[in-house]
Amino acid sequence: MEEAAIRECFEETDLKITVEKEVSRYYNNIGDLVFQFEAELQEGQNKNSLTGTWEGEPAWIDLEDLSEYKLGFKLSELITR
């Protein structure tokens, strides 16, 4: 699954990441199995160079602004650790 997360991140943002660990696994409200990972940008990657795809426009969100967004299951408590 880590390889899928790396590939999806690159396809959707053009950013290369290194997955640190899986932090959550659950079924969403339509029955899809969702995986969430902790990851770091690889050296030389710029979080300000995000590019969008047909799926939407990604954005880097500062920790102090997270309360304004609906996040995945348990993600808000995992981020603040």
Image (cartoon, rainbow, N blue to C red):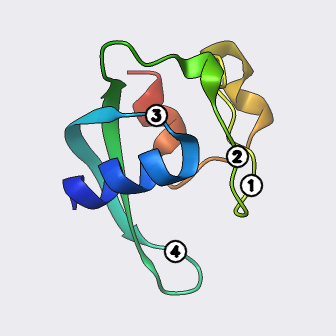
Please name the residue that numbered disc 2 is placed on: 52
How many residues crowd mark 1 within 10 Å: few (<14), some (14–19), many (20+)?
few
**Callout 2: SS:** loop
Rounded to the nearest whole Å, what is the CA distance between mark 4 and mark 3?
Answer: 26 Å
Relative side of 45 to 19, left or right: right
What residue did someone put label 3 on?
15
Question: The disc labelled 3 sits on which kind of residue?
Answer: Leu
**Residue 56 circle label:** 1
Q: Mark 4 points at which residue?
A: 28
Q: In the figure, 2 relative to 39: above or below?
A: below
Mark 2 vs mark 1, foreground winner is 2
Locate the C terminus by quadrant.
top left
Q: Distance between the residues labelled 2 and 1?
A: 6 Å
Crowd tier of the residue under label 3, counting other residues whose Cα lies within 10 Å: few below 14, some 14–19, many 20 or above = many
Residue drawn at the location 73% of the way across and 21% of the way down: 65
Which badge, 4 or 3, is on the more N-terminal residue? 3
Earlier along the polypeptide chain: callout 2 or callout 4?
4
Q: Give the x, y percent position of residue 54.
A: 73, 63
